[in-house]
Each structure stands twice: as structure tokens, then as C-alpha cells.
Amino acid sequence: MKKREITSVLYEYNSPAELEKVYERLIENAKKAAENAYAPYSKFKVGAAVLLENDEIVIGNNQENAAYPSGLCAERVAIFYANAKYPDKSIKAIAVAAINNNSFVKEPISPCGSCLQVMLESEKKTKSSIKVFLYGQKQTLMAESINQFLPINFNGDLLLK
């Protein structure tokens, strides 16, 4: 047996104001998207904002449905919409913000595994990393790539072998 350690690197910011203005604006778009989420059952509202290489920002929010699991997460709504509207543009960054109990979460939340897998597919498709910004009232986290969340991942290369 051999022990193998895998390390992820995240950058922590006290406030989005510490970021470049474009990323601060991206987080603000994610927060606005969260406010408009459709979450009548969980009351857990999530917003996502995607920054494309052409500097367009596309937003999405979670959409719940009484017939679980027919809803969809904010990150996938935003990414699928970006891919539909701008199919040839790569994603430079995504920001995620969540509201629980009528206020933004204190600590940032991570995208779910399905959303991370979709983000990974977007990175692979365009051969470019996606920066991930996770907003919380106490701190904002940033990862330079989806690989920081899924260092061992399933991807299309495995299907081709």
C-alpha cells in the first residue's frame, strides 16, 4: 500500500471588495440572482453568475419543483444558459451566493457534485480553467480551477479508452 495525499488550494478574502472589480461585480450578480431564486420548499436560495471570455455575465438561480428532483441548481442553470446563448465562448469565472433564513449565508457554500461535474466538463471542453468564487458574509473563497474541488475526477477521456 502507498499513501497518497491530495491538496486543494483556496484563497480566502474578507470581502469581495478585495477582488478585482470584474469579480466583485460577478459576485454582486450572483447575489442578485439568489434573491430571485424559486425555492418555495427549501427556502434555500442560490444564485450563480458566469463570466464569459467576451466579458458577458450570465446569471442563473435554483429552480425548485414539488416533484423532486425536477428542479435544477443555480450553477447549472447559469452554465447551460451561457452555453446555449454563447456556445463558442469559454467561461472565465463563476460566482455562487446563497440565502438561508432570509439572509446571505455566513460561510460560503460549495456547489454540489453534479454542478462541479458540469463545471469540469466546461473546463475540459474549452481547455481553460474556470475561477470559482464562493460568497459568504464572513469570507469569500476563490479557487483557480474546478480541479481544486475534484482533483480525482471522471471525464470524457475515460470514455475514449
Image (cartoon, grey):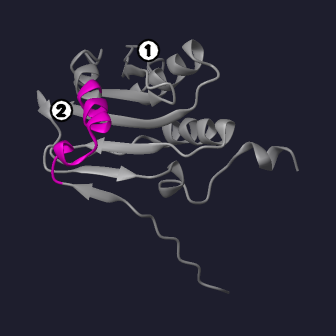
Number of residue marks: 2
Q: Residues within 10 Å of mark 1 (few under 14, many from 20)?
A: few
Q: Main secondary structure of the magenta part?
A: helix
Report the residue marked by disc 2.
Answer: 100
Name the residue rendered at 20%, 43% in the picture.
16
Instruction: Give the magenta part as a residue range.
Output: 14-29
Q: Picture quarter containing residue 95?
A: top left
**Left or right: 145 as drawn, with respect to 12:** right
Residue 49's tag is: none
The answer to which quarter of the image holds residue 38 is: top left
From the top left corner, tell me how far across and down residue 103 is, in percent: 11, 31
User: Residue visible at 66% across and 43% down?
Assistant: 127
Answer with left or right where residue 122 lies relative to residue 43: right
Q: Nearer the viewer, residue 36 or 140?
A: 140
The residue labelled by disc 1 is 67
SS class, disc 1:
loop
Query: Which residue is farthest right?
Result: 161
Answer yes or no: is residue 101 visible: no
Where residue 12 sits, quadrant-wise, is: bottom left
Among numbered discs 2 and 1, the one appearing first in the sequence = 1
Q: Is residue 83 visible?
A: yes
| Residue 26 lies in the magenta-colored region | yes
Q: Work out which residue is located at the far bottom of the displayed protein and give it.
A: 1
The x and y percentages for residue 150 are: 54, 54
Q: Nearer the viewer, residue 61 or 67?
A: 61
Residue 57, compared with residue 146, is above or below; it is: above
Above or below, 67 against 108 in this view is: above
Magenta span includes 82: no
Q: Is residue 73 above or below residue 155?
A: above
Q: Position of residue 9 (x, y in %)?
A: 41, 64
Residue type highlighted by circle 1: Ala
